[in-house]
Amino acid sequence: TEAPGRRNCGVSVGTHRRHDGLGRSIRAPPSTLHPHPVIRFLLRRLGLAVPTLLGVSLVIFVTIRIVPGDPVASLLGPTGSPEARVELTHKLGLDQPIPVQYVTWLGRVGQGDLGRSIAKQTDALPYVWEAFRNTITLSLFAAGVAIVGGIALGVIAATRRGKVASAISSGLSLFAVQ
């Protein structure tokens, strides 16, 4: 232990102290049984990602299912025969119970099969990928503008402290957060 009145300021996170028998404290390597706090945090976050993704996939599946309209009628059009309707319903798996449909859909999505576009009659993945790329581009641009603008407003507020420019930059930064 330590002398009274002294604080243990020299211990870094993830290390432990032992004594060498002469009252001196020596640093011991962290135990492999207790991972570093950052590792524990990341493992906990990854563990929470699984139920979150399953919940999101369930919401997406239910949303797709409750959209009004009949997908078979949309695909066949008004001239579709009852036999073609039954065949397409079976081909799409819509004759299966909803839990079976969900598990099948989840397995296909997990393999990268997002189905077919009804409007274009091609795989939907290229369209989703294009929209994803556009979203990432827009997000990166917005983050860049926010970072540059935030730094500029921060510099103005710091260098002109107590002046009108500082108040305006602080107000603008608060407005931007909202």
Image (cartoon, rainbow, N blue to C red):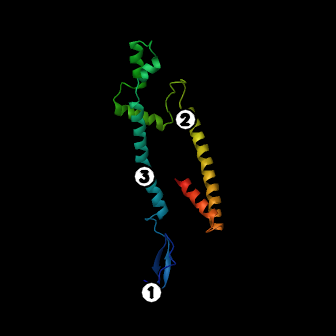
Q: What x and y, as percent, mark residue 136?
A: 59, 44
Pinpoint residue 122: horizontal percent, then vertical percent: 55, 26
Image coords of residue 158 (percent x, y):
63, 67
Of the numbered discs 1 and 3, the one sitting upstream in the chain is 1
Whole-percent x and y of residue 125? Answer: 54, 33
Q: Earlier in the sequence, mark 1 or mark 2?
A: 1
Give the foreground label among 1 and 3: 1
Observer-nearest of 50 and 28: 50
Amino acid carrying label 3: it is: Gly
Q: Residues within 10 Å of mark 3 (few under 14, many from 20)?
A: few
Residue 123: give its label: none
Please name the residue that numbered disc 1 is placed on.
5
Distance from label 1 to label 3 (Cα)? 42 Å
Mark 1 Cα shell of 10 Å, populated few (<14), some (14-19), many (≥20)? few
Q: On the rendered structure, is 117 left or right of 72?
A: right
Give the residue pinned by disc 3.
47
Q: Spatial distance from mark 1 to mark 2, Cα to Cα? A: 63 Å
Query: What amino acid is labelled 1 in the image?
Result: Gly
Q: Which residue is mark 2?
A: 128
User: Which residue is pictured at 55% across the width and 54% down the height?
Assistant: 175
Q: Looking at the picture, tell me which residue is in the foreground, 144 or 173.
A: 173
Q: Amino acid at mark 2?
A: Val
For the N terminus, the image quarter is: bottom left
> Are the two marked residues, 1 and 3, in contact with CB atoms closer than 8 angstroms?
no
Q: Is residue 28 above or below residue 89?
A: below
Of label 3 and label 2, which has the lower sequence position?
3
Q: Is residue 96 above or below residue 18?
A: above
